[in-house]
């Protein structure tokens, strides 16, 4: 019988922010930093071709910024992170409605987990290749990492394959591996007390 593994490496938190107006990104950044800690690196804004769903949620050209957070998070936290990001989205939506902004959704926040061998994106929409994580959240294996390189899957959105995004994720993975080494060194070091 196989043994259940209870101690696994934490995840690197990456949040993708889709927006039209820069001010909504600035508002979201305040909320995200308050909830998840400091941002180590970011990429963007990038312009991309929207999916039909994204196009239905916004009017005009959308921008994307990806944020790499310094603090590692528990690997089982992706659903709760998506719920927290949704709460931020709803707060900003109420603010936009109070200001009589026409867009139905001023910003979309998609938290993701980066591991040594994979990149998993959260979603509130079910698809055959997504696994249910609880709380109305699904996880999608978006990129695999083999021999240090990202590989796409048939369902990987094109914006995750842009060279700037792949370079950003490669840098985030290097920082993640460095953080894991530091955590191992800290936990394995003999106590001098």
Image (spheres, rainbow, N blue to C red):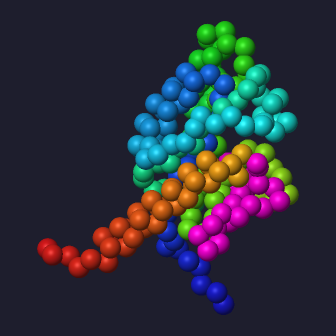
Q: Quadrant of the C terminus?
A: bottom left
Q: Residue furthest left?
A: 193
Between residue 118 and residue 137, name the one nearer to us: 118
Residue at 55% over, 59% down: 170
The magenta segment: 135-158
Q: Quadrant of the N terminus?
A: bottom right
Q: Residue furthest front?
A: 163
Residue at 51% over, 56% down: 172
Q: Residue furthest bottom?
A: 1
| 30 relative to 81, above or below | above
Q: Is 16 included in the stretch rendered in magenta?
A: no
Residue at 66% over, 9% down: 100
In the image, is 35 to the left or to the right of 193?
right
Give residue 77's quadrant in the image: bottom right
Between residue 71 and residue 41, name the one nearer to us: 41
Residue 49: percent from the left, percent from the top? 78, 37
Residue at 81% over, 50% down: 126
Between residue 174 and residue 95, name the one nearer to us: 174
Give residue 97's quadrant in the image: top right
| 46 relative to 13, above or below | above
Residue 87: percent from the left, percent from the top? 59, 34
Q: Is 147 included in the stretch rendered in magenta?
A: yes
In the image, is 154 to the left or to the right of 116?
right
| 52 relative to 113, above or below | above
Q: Is residue 111 visible?
A: no
| 20 relative to 16, above or below | above
Q: Is residue 99 visible?
A: yes
Residue 138: percent from the left, percent from the top? 72, 52
């Amino acid at each position: 019988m196989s043994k259940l593994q209870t101690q696994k490496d934490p995840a690197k938190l990456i949040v993708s922010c889709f927006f039209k107006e820069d001010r909504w990104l600035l508002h979201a950044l305040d909320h995200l930093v308050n909830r998840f800690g400091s941002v180590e690196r970011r990429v963007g804004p990038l312009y991309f071709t929207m999916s039909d769903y994204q196009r239905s949620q916004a009017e005009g050209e959308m921008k994307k910024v990806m944020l790499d957070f310094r603090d590692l998070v528990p690997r089982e936290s992706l659903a709760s992170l998506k719920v927290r990001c949704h709460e931020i989205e709803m707060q900003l939506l109420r603010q936009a409605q109070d200001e009589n902004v026409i867009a139905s959704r001023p910003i979309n926040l998609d938290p993701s987990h980066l591991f040594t061998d994979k990149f998993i994106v959260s979603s509130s929409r079910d698809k055959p290749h997504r696994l249910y994580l609880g709380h109305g959240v699904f996880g999608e294996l978006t990129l695999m990492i083999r021999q240090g390189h990202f590989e796409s899957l048939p369902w990987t959105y094109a914006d995750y394959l842009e060279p700037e995004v792949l370079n950003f994720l490669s840098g985030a993975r290097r920082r993640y591996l460095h953080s894991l080494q530091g955590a191992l060194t800290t936990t394995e070091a003999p106590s001098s007390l």
